Image: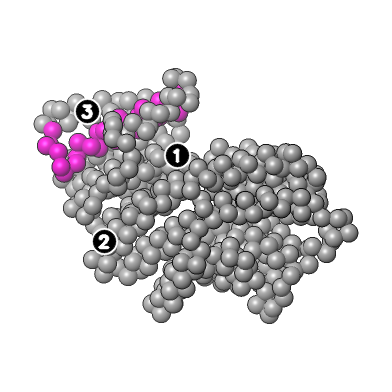
Amino acid sequence: MSTELQSRPAGLPHAVFLQRVADEPATSPDVRLGQGAFLALRFVDLLAPDREPPTPDVFRYQWAATERYCAELAGEGTEASHLSCIVRAAGEAHRTGEFNLVAPALFAYAMYLEQESHFEEAEDALQTMINIGVGRLPPSDAISAWMRLGRVLRKQTEFDRATTAYNEAGRVAQAAGDQFSVLLSRIGVSNVVHFRGNLPEAERGWRALLVDARDGGYRNAEAQAHHGLGNVLQRRGLAHAGAPHLWRAYELYEDEVDQLGVLNDLGIALLSIGDLDGAERALGEIARRERVGGNRTNALIELMQCASFRRDRLGFERLREECLDHLDQMPPNIRADYYLKVGIGLARFGNFTKAETSMRQALEIASAHELHEMVFRIERIRGGLRACEAPEEMVGAATEPTHQSDALREVSASLAALSP
C-alpha cells in the first residue's frame, strides 16, 4: 500500500503545527497547543514500522516528557484532550504491540482539526495514522483514513493528491470486498472532478454512481449521488432538473448534518430559477436548526443573496457583517463565493466601485486555488455587473419561478411543510 502523497516540501516532520508561532504570541494557548501537537506526533512516530524500535529507556523518557507537557495543557479545551488521548494510546500501543490502538485517537484529532479549518494540520495527523498503521490497520480504518485525507486535500484544492487518496481508499475497499466503500471512493473522485470544473464528466460520474448505488441498495451512497447530480445540474444551468434530485437526497439522508448541507444547495438551486420563497424556506431551516458551523455560514451567504435579490439593503448588510465574522474559517471555495455574492449585492444596490473590488477578490481566490468552474462563473458575472441593477418595477417579478413542473411544485410544497 502506498503511504505517502508526494508534493509537500520535505522538512521537519509535523512542523506544520509550529507555524502557529508566526500568527500568535509565543505564550498564547494556541501556540502551546501547536507545540504539544508537534511533540505528541513525534512521539507517535516512534511506533512507525519502517524505523528501528527505540530502546525501552528511550521510549519511557520520551513518553514521560510528552505526557508531562500535555498535562500542562490541561484546561485548554478540546484540543488538549485530543493530545492527551493520542499520547496515552501510543504508550499503550507500544506496551501491548497493538499498534492499531492509536488510530482512533489520531482520526478523532484530525476530524477536530478539520472542523476548526486547520486543514494542513488535519492532513498531517491523517498521514501519521496511515504511516503508523501500514500493514497493521484493519481495512475499515485504512479506508476511513484515506477517505478523510482525500476530503481534507480537496478542501485545500490539492486536487491531484485528493484523487490519489480517494483511489487508494477504493483499492483497499475492493481488496476487502467492501462495495459500499468502493462507491464512497468513487463519490470522492466525482466531487474532485466537480470542484475542478469538469461538469460534463462530473455529471457522467454521478449518474453512473446513482445507478450502482440504487441497484446495490446503498441508501447513503444513493443520497450522495442524488446530491452530487443535483448540484452539477444546477451548475450547468439546469437547476429546475437538479432541485428534485437535491430534495430526494434530503429524504434519503439520515444524518442531520447531511440534511442541512443539501438544504443549502437546494436553496441555491431554487434561487437560481427565481423561487425566492422556496429558497428562503430551505435556507431559513438551516439557520433555525444549526447555530454554528459550515452549513450555517453557507446558508447565511445565500440568505444574503436572497436579501439583495429582494433589494432589502438592511437585511443584506446585516447578513454580510455576520458572514464576515466567519471569513477566516471559510475554505477557499466558500470565501470566493462570499466575495462573489457581496459583489453581486453591491451592484444591485448601485455601488459598482465596491462591487468590482469584491469581484476581484473573489477571482483572485478562485484563481489561486484552481477553482476553474468558479473562475469562469465569476468572470461571466463580472462582465455583466451593471445588469445586476434591475429597474425597481422588475424586482417583484423576479421572485416568480422561471420553471414550473410537478416535481418542482412537490419540492416547494415539501419545503413549506418543514416550517414549524
> Viewer-nearest of labels 3 and 2?
2
User: Which percent across, then down, holds residue 87?
Assistant: 28, 36
Q: Residue at x 33, y 31 (%)?
A: 15
Q: Which residues are magenta?
A: 28-54
Left or right: 319 as drawn, with respect to 390: left
* In the image, residue 283 above or below residue 359: below
Task: Residue type at mark 1: give it.
Answer: His
**Secondary structure under badge 2?**
helix
Q: Which residue is mark 3?
A: 62
Task: Residue type at mark 2: give it.
Answer: Val
**Secondary structure under badge 1?**
loop
Q: Earlier in the sequence, mark 3 or mark 2?
A: 3
Rounded to the nearest angstrom, the CA distance separating label 3 from label 2 is 34 Å
* In the image, residue 20 above or below residue 267: above
Residue 158 seen in the current view? yes
Q: Earlier in the sequence, mark 1 or mark 2?
A: 1
Mark 2 residue crowding within 10 angstroms, few (<14) / some (14–19) / many (20+): some
Mark 3 residue crowding within 10 angstroms, few (<14) / some (14–19) / many (20+): some
Query: Does the CB distance between marks 1 and 2 fall below 8 Å?
Result: no
User: Which percent across, then down, holds residue 300?
Assistant: 66, 49
Q: Could you say which disc has been placed on residue 172 in the image?
A: 2
Left or right: 355 as drawn, with respect to 158: right
Q: Which residue is mark 1?
A: 118
Rounded to the nearest angstrom, the CA distance separating label 1 from label 2 is 27 Å
Rounded to the nearest angstrom, the CA distance separating label 3 from label 1 is 26 Å
Which of the 4 quarters of the picture holds residue 342? top right
